[in-house]
Image: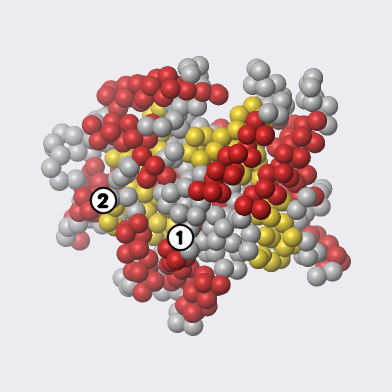
Amino acid sequence: MTKRKTSILANLDKKFLWHPFTQMKEWGMQDNLIIERGKGNYLIDTNGRKYLDGVSSLWVNIHGHRKKEIDSAIKKQIDKISHSTLLGLGNIPSIKLAEKLVKIAPKGLTKVFYSDNGSTAVEIALKMAFQYWKQAIGNRQEAMGKKTKFVAFTNAYHGDTFGSMSVGEIDVFVKKYKPLLFPTFKAFYPYCYRCPINKTYPDCKISCIKRFEEILKSHHNEIAACIIEPIIQGAGGIIVSPPGFLKKVRQLCTKYKILLIADEVATGFGRTGKMFACEHENVSPDFLCLAKGITGGYLPLAATLTTQKIYNAFLGEYKDLKTFFHGHTYTGNPLGCAAAIANLEIFEKEKTIQRLEPKIKLLTQLLKRLKNLPYAGDVRQKGLMAGIELVKDKKTKKAFPMELRIGSKICMEARKHGLIIRPLGDTIVIMPPLSITTDEIRKMMDIIYRCVEFVGGNCPSAGAGL
């Protein structure tokens, strides 16, 4: 494609499109990158330039772009049927995928409800948990219908629909909408770097667990479910919880008869080094929310998995109105399910999870170099997910002024060197496809180091030593 055609497309983009999570005033004044193709772990723009996909096209791509097995599965399904509803009908790919998901999911999750994206997967879990307590058999009559609230964690992100925002907390995403959101109990997520209790890491875990139990002990008769991003908070800045925290949350939820929702939209499908993050602590939630990597980064699809016990509470005569009255037009879409089946078959055929360990170790090793930079306030990692939090003053942890847009500038600089990454504020997120090679990891980390060093060193407000 010629530069003139690229310019025409860029002008049309600015004239007609409204991009997500984007300040469109800035977008309208800058040169914009337009992706035309992808191959392997690379994106290719309309001018033919290649970029290493360091953020998996927003955390979704698993095996690389144009993976022949997934391409073929989608084409093959198109030759049969592209969509038919699950309302009153079944379709083959949705049935086969449900069986595969149950086989690889944490123990006890036996039922699959499909939707379109991570936010809807979470909404479904919230609604199911709420309705379950209104219909569950065997509860004391006086307790039924009273468990209508949720407990979530500080710094959480669970999506952008109203239910998922209500259990989220990051102000930039939810503050403007708070009058429309339902109230939730908030427990501290252990992260000492910004911990309001100011404890050391192990003590922080103990303190956060103690306060979490205090909430459950005082309000368990009101709380339907607890929702957590297991092991890692994604949009909150790649925050890794200390070992044992998730397991203790599970134990306390069981003790106080509160359902546990595990939001693995970001962490699922190998990102943390295991198929699901819950596996790191042998935790089985009551709900498992999946999206993003489920189709290998090809098509919108999500799934909410739950237990037979939850499912049974929705069974009855039609007149009882116990039905879960929720659904989406493209629920269980055959094309998406066909892609997801191919995605899981690749995991098995190529032993994707087993082959991650050397890559994870290499990333850990290369991240150590970044820790030595004077403005790297914190470097966090689990599996092939990592976050580099940049600060103006490493000793005081003082942040850069928001208007400097340090994180954004570093990511824009990385583009000049052939790498696509995206920040969360001033935290640089590293989340490449699982198919990334060791040579590509070295290339990615070298570019990031040079860009962090260059942008930080040339920032007029960065302070001494920069």
The amino acid type of the residue labelled 1 equals Lys
| Mark sitting on residue 108 | 2
Residue 335, relative to residue 176: is it above or below? below
Q: Nearer the viewer, residue 361 or 392?
A: 361
| Mark sitting on residue 242 | none
- Nearest-to-viewer mark from 2 and 1: 1
Residue 342, relative to residue 54: is it above or below? below
Q: What's the residue at 84%, 69% (across, down)?
A: 2
Q: Is 248 situated left or right of 9 in this image?
A: left
Q: Can residue 131 be spotted in the picture?
A: yes
Residue 284: x and y in percent read: 31, 45
Closer to the N terminus: mark 2 or mark 1?
A: 2
Residue 51, relative to residue 451: is it above or below? below
Q: Nearer the viewer, residue 289 or 280?
A: 280
The amino acid type of the residue labelled 2 equals Gly
Task: Residue 56: name its quadrant.
Answer: bottom right
The residue lying furthest to the right in this view is 4
Q: What's the residue at 36%, 74% (across, down)?
A: 92
Residue 37, relative to residue 437: is it above or below? below
Task: Residue 205: name its quadrant.
Answer: top left
Neighbor class of circle 2 (other Cα within 10 Å; few <14, some 14-19, many 20+) is: some
Cα–Cα span, label 2 and label 1: 24 Å
Residue 248: x and y in percent read: 33, 31
